[in-house]
Amino acid sequence: MNLTTQTLQVFDPAMCCSTGVCGPDVDTKLVQFAADLDWLKAQGVIVQRHNLSQNPAAFVENEAVKTALTEKGEAALPVLLVNGKVAATGHYPERAELALLFKLKATATPAPAPAKSSCCGGGSC
């Protein structure tokens, strides 16, 4: 199977920066998820992220995401699409779950490093 044709689209809730890994109280789940997405990219998966506050048009233009938001509201976020189909809603999957979605063997997940600086300027969002 050619992994370069495999895609993961992540539709994140509104955050101050594209990954949510910023500000004084960084969520370690988001740090780990960002590392897991980097791991997926290294496996040949095409990863695209859309942040509600920075790219609302992507949410409106995608029928699957629009449907999830209509049915569950913001509780549906994040919405993850694998090859255009909804694979997960309402939570950030761990590396093992992401690996299963793409039929990959998950490697050990390193502990997330704390964010070095804020992307939000001044240390707050």
Image: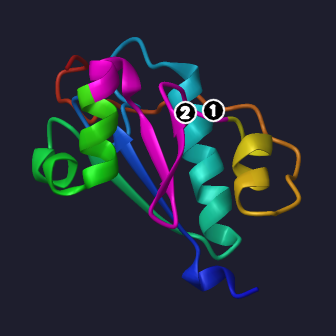
* Residue at 65% across, 61% down: 40
Q: Is residue 32 visible?
A: yes
At numbered mark 2, what does the secondary structure look like: helix, strand or loop? helix
Q: Earlier in the sequence, mark 2 or mark 1?
A: 2
- Is residue 103 shown left or right of residue 94? right
In the picture as drawn, the residue positioned furthest to the top comes out as 25
The residue that disc 1 covers is 113
Marks 2 & 1, CB-CB < 8 Å contact: yes
Q: Residues within 10 Å of mark 2 (few under 14, many from 20)?
A: some
82 versus 70 height, above or below: below
Q: Marks 2 and 1, how far apart in space?
A: 7 Å
In the picture as drawn, the residue positioned furthest to the bottom comes out as 2
Q: Amino acid at mark 2?
A: Val
Q: Which mark is residue 57?
A: none
Q: Is residue 15 visible?
A: no
- Is residue 96 shown left or right of residue 62? right
The residue that disc 2 covers is 31
Q: Is residue 83 magenta?
A: yes
Q: Amino acid at mark 1?
A: Ala
